[in-house]
Image: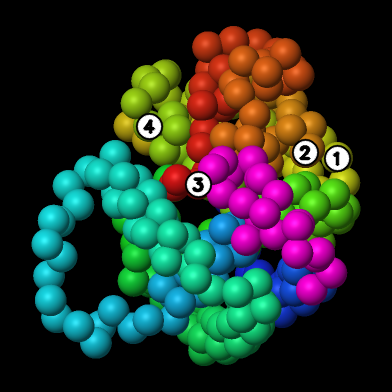
């Protein structure tokens, strides 16, 4: 085992954007209304949501000193706020034509890439990745989280219009690696003896191995498998990304996951959610 390393994905943004724009430009008018797994959002709604994400990231919040009307006090309130803001934007975007959504996505994707390239990767970001930690992350992790958001919603669009998913290792491996950074928070309230470890193997071309180790009062994530782990969990890559983004129920996932050793520890892995809303 070794400490987990940074995930640098800035250069994946332009090709990921090109893949999305190619799909969107190929759609027939009726395709934009197709339902997605992000019910009740249609394909157009998900595309508009991605555009809204770009605009939100590009807006410099430092330019306004007005405090929020209702400060967020806990995780649940943060999720509620995100869902509320997302819905307001998607409703407003009903008035934007698909052609303009495509043009704006192209423009803002390029600006967002330039913005991410300008950041010092190891400096602290201005916002948290709350599903992983309450502490401010380095920019590289905030950017990796943004990459997973864009990759995930593109898969939702692709599934809805019967286009192949982006499952090659170059696309999926950084997504899974980023998602696994949510394990320490998932286990934060689970007590265990010092040195207890749980190993997780995601099988498939884009998979890997990680181990969560109890150190003092906290759980720490490592890359690699602990041969003395109290529990080993094996998950196929095609199931893993869906499980960690609420795309499949825990009950359905349990029937497809192999857990060897302490079942209580292994089942906690299945509780991980690596998205906010």
Instruction: Give the residues in magenta.
Output: 25-44
* Mark 4 or 3: the one toward you: 3
Q: Which residue has dot 4 on it?
A: 188
Disc 1 vs disc 2: Cβ atoms closer than 8 Å? yes
Residue for point 65% across, 72% down: 98
- Distance from the alpha carbon under mark 1 to that under mark 3: 22 Å
Say what secondary structure mark 2 lies in: helix
- Distance from the alpha carbon under mark 2 to that under mark 4: 24 Å
Q: Which residue has dot 3 on it?
A: 275
* Position of residue 144 measured from the top left corner of the image (x, y, whole percent): 57, 63
Q: Note whether residue 137 is visible.
A: no
Residue for point 44% across, 47% down: 276
Quarter residue 48 falls in: bottom right
* Position of residue 108 measured from the top left corner of the image (x, y, whole percent): 56, 83
Q: Which residue has dot 1 on it?
A: 204
Residue for point 50% across, 46% down: 275
Say what secondary structure mark 4 lies in: loop
**Dot 2 alpha-carbon crowd within 10 angstroms: few under 14, some 14 to 19, many 20 or more:** many
Say what secondary structure mark 1 lies in: loop
In the picture, measured across the screen, residue 69 lies left or right of residue 8, that is: left
In the picture, measured across the screen, residue 105 lies left or right of residue 123, that is: right
- Distance from the alpha carbon under mark 1 to that under mark 4: 28 Å
Q: Is residue 36 magenta?
A: yes
- Distance from the alpha carbon under mark 2 to that under mark 3: 17 Å
Q: Pick the residue in front: 153 or 103.
A: 103
Q: Which residue has dot 2 on it?
A: 237
* Mark 1 or 4: the one toward you: 1
């Amino acid at each position: 085992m070794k400490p987990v390393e940074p995930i640098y994905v800035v250069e994946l943004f332009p090709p990921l954007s090109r893949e999305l724009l190619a799909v969107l430009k190929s759609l027939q008018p009726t395709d934009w209304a197709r339902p997605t797994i992000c019910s009740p959002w249609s394909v157009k709604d998900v595309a508009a949501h991605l555009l809204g994400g770009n605009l939100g990231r590009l807006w410099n919040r430092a330019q306004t000193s007005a405090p929020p009307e209702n400060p967020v006090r806990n995780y649940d309130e943060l999720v509620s706020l995100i869902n509320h803001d997302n819905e307001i934007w998607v409703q407003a975007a009903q008035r934007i034509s698909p052609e303009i959504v495509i043009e704006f996505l192209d423009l803002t994707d390029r600006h967002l890439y330039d913005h991410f390239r300008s950041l010092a990767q190891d400096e602290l970001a201005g916002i948290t990745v709350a599903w992983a930690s309450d502490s401010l992350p380095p920019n590289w992790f905030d950017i990796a989280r943004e990459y997973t958001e864009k990759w995930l919603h593109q898969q939702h669009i692709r599934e809805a219009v019967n286009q192949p998913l982006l499952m090659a290792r170059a696309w999926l491996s950084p997504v899974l690696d980023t998602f696994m950074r949510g394990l320490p928070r998932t286990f934060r309230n689970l007590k265990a003896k010092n040195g207890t470890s749980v190993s997780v193997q995601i099988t498939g071309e884009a998979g890997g191995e990680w181990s969560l180790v109890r150190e003092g009062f906290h759980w720490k994530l490592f890359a690699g498998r602990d041969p003395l782990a109290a529990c080993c969990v094996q998950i196929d890559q095609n199931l893993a990304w869906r499980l960690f983004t609420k795309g499949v129920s825990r009950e359905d996932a349990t029937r497809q996951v192999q857990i060897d050793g302490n079942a209580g520890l292994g089942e906690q892995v299945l509780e991980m959610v690596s998205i906010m809303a």
